[in-house]
Each structure stands twice: as C-alpha cells, then as structure tokens.
Image: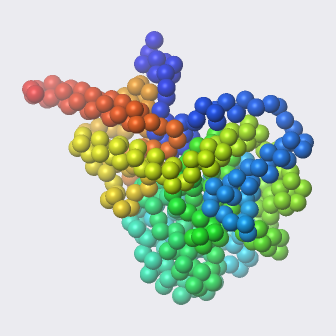
Amino acid sequence: MTPFAAAATDRLVLMNPGPVVLDDRVRAALSGPDLCHREPEFAGLLARIRHKTTLVAGGGDAHTAVLLTGSGTSAVEAVISSAVPPGGGLLVIDNGHYGERLADIAAAHGIRTHRLEAGWAVPVDLAAVERALAADPGLTHVGVVHHETSTGMLNDVAGIARIAHAYGREVIVDAVSSVGAERVSPAEDGVDWLAGSANKCLEGAPGLAFVVAATDAFERLGAFPRRTYYLDLHRHYTAQAKSGLPAFTPGIPACYAFEAALDLALAEGREARHARYRALAERLRAGLEALGLELLLPPGQRAVGLTALRLPPGTGYEELHRGLRAAGFVIYRAQERLAADHWRLSTMGRITAADIDRFLSVLADLLRDRADSTDVTEGGTR
C-alpha cells in the first residue's frame, strides 16, 4: 500500500482554508432524505437557514439573508453586480489577491472602480480611504475583504465602514473567510452588504454562499436594471422572501449540512469559536517558530483562521505538500506574488490540538530528514 493510500484510510486533516474538516453531525446531515425544492418541507428548511444565517452573521431585526448555491465568490459577485447602481462606482480596498478579485468582478460587469492598492500584506491606510472618497463623489460603494486569505491579514472593516458612512457610501464586505469566527456585524459594524460562505469558519459543506443585508436594501435593488441573471440578488431575495422558495434548484444536501453547521455555530457562539481557533493558531505558530520558520505577518495583523509563512530554506512547496499529504495533512500553496516562497496553513474547521501537535511533529521530521539528506549530498556530516 502506498503512503497516499494509507493516509486515505485514516483521518485526513485539511489545513487548506476551505473546504474544512467537518463535525460528524454535519457530515451525517449530508445524507438527508431526497427532497424536491418546491415542496413545503424545503421551504421550511430554507426559512430556518436564512434566519440562522442572519443571526450568526451578526444581523439584527432589520436584516435578512439570501442563500445562493455556489462558492463564496458567487455571493461576492452577486453583491457587486446587483448593489452598485448604474452610474455608481466602487472603491476597492486592495491589499491581497481577494482585494484584486473585487476589482476584477466589478470590471467584468462594467462597473467603474478606483483601486486603492496598499500592497500585499500591508494594512489598510484609513486616511487614504477617506481621501479617495472625498475626491470622488461618484464612488457610491466601498469594497473590502475582511480576512484577506492570500496573506492571513485581518482588515479593519469597522473603521472603513465609519469613514464610508460619513461620506454617505455603502460598504460591501467579503467575509467569506471570517464570518463565524471573527468579529464582523452588519448591525454593529455598519456593514451594508456581507458576503459569506458555508464551508469555512461556519464549518458547513462546500457549495453554498449567502448575502446578509438590511431587508429594505434588498427591496431597493428592484429599481436597478439587472447586470446578471443567475446571480441577480433581487431575483433571489424576491423568490426566497416572498414565495419562500428558491429561484433555482439549490444544493439540497449542502442545505441539510448547513443547517446542522449553523446550529453548532450558534450553540458555540462566535466568541467561543474565535477563542478555539485562536488557541489552535497560537499553538501552530509557536511550533512553527520553534522550528525556525518565518511567519508572514506580525501578531496584531493575523486572522485566527490562517497562517502564511515562508517556505523552509531549500525546500519547494511540492516537496513539502507531498511529504505532509503522505502523513495525512493537506496544506495550501500561497498565491501569485507570494507563491514562489510562501505557503499557508488553516486552522478553520474541526481541527484539534492533537492534529496540530502531530502536524508539527511530522513537519519537524521532514525538515530533519531533508537536512540530513542535504548534508550527505554535499559530503558533510552532522
């Protein structure tokens, strides 16, 4: 039996930032009964999911949620293409790959953008945000990624929202990799449009996304011409809020799993989940630094769900991935300008302290074996 085949029979620990390791109760929910999405049973399931999603995302009585079948990017694209009015514009806060994606999505729909580039892994300059909004009244919306997963940076969404609202602008937040574990709230932080995903910090199965916003904001979308068909938020809102049924065929098994995941998230609470993730991340980061590895961000800028770090000297990503995958761990390559010399490790999902300890032990063995091999190749001794 090959090492990969052996690992496949044991626990596979996903240290990529979604999909995540699921709770057994969420995994079991995927095998729910066959169901037609036009029947009252699904209408009840959809209503419960929308209500629980609104709560877990920090919405209040004035807010509601719209469920979409798709990845987190589908929710981000639905908001940008639907909420920015004709003649409006989007100020894009860009300090990583997913900030760049906001601008790319807007461009695909012919929406004018002003891209405020901070640089990858550079904190957002709030004064620069204010200057950009003051200089261009045509920028009706501000788009920002809360947890910039390309670097692991957590951006100051509440600070950006305060500035945007002072200038009468709306804020679109990509909270795909943060909602459920990091503090972000439409009701308390002034987030006008929150896009999220089921399968990251909310620990559901892949395939569902959502948007949370004020109910009257969804209603106002009806006055705008449609830029898209399937991702038109007003279409989805009208179907779900008025008829109680989806506009199109949803991923029903993923819906069963998402309700189970939402129940677990609400029972645990955001602060407790944040603390659980933080404890795992700190355990992982301390172990990585003890191995002499260099983390990308200083402590005050890191999200609890992901750690980006430099590759070990003389070790390529593929070699590292291969060795760790054989031991039952899936890691993640860094993106674009960081891809050559960085990699990423997630602490989202049902990862345990024992998983972290075993990962660090396996990684230490891999690095030690490689160092020994290098010494032999170079004719040295240890």
- Quick check: 64 above or below 133? above
**Viewport quadrant of the N terminus:** top left
Measuring 69% from the left and 61% from the top, which residue is drawn there? 212
- Quick check: 248 above or below 371? below
Q: In the rendered image, which quarter is residue 89 located in?
A: bottom right
Q: In the rendered image, which quarter is residue 363 located in?
A: top left
Measuring 73% from the left and 75% from the top, which residue is drawn there? 85
- Quick check: 237 above or below 265? below
Q: Position of residue 377 (x, y in %)?
A: 17, 26
Q: Position of residue 223 (x, y in %)?
A: 83, 74
Measuring 54% from the left and 43% from the top, which residue is drawn there? 18
- Quick check: 85 above or below 232? below
- The answer to whether residue 176 shows anywhere in this view is yes
Q: In the rendered image, which quarter is residue 331 located in?
A: top left
Q: Position of residue 116 (x, y in %)?
A: 49, 73
- The answer to whether residue 107 shows anywhere in this view is no
Between 211 and 321, the one lying in front of the other is 211
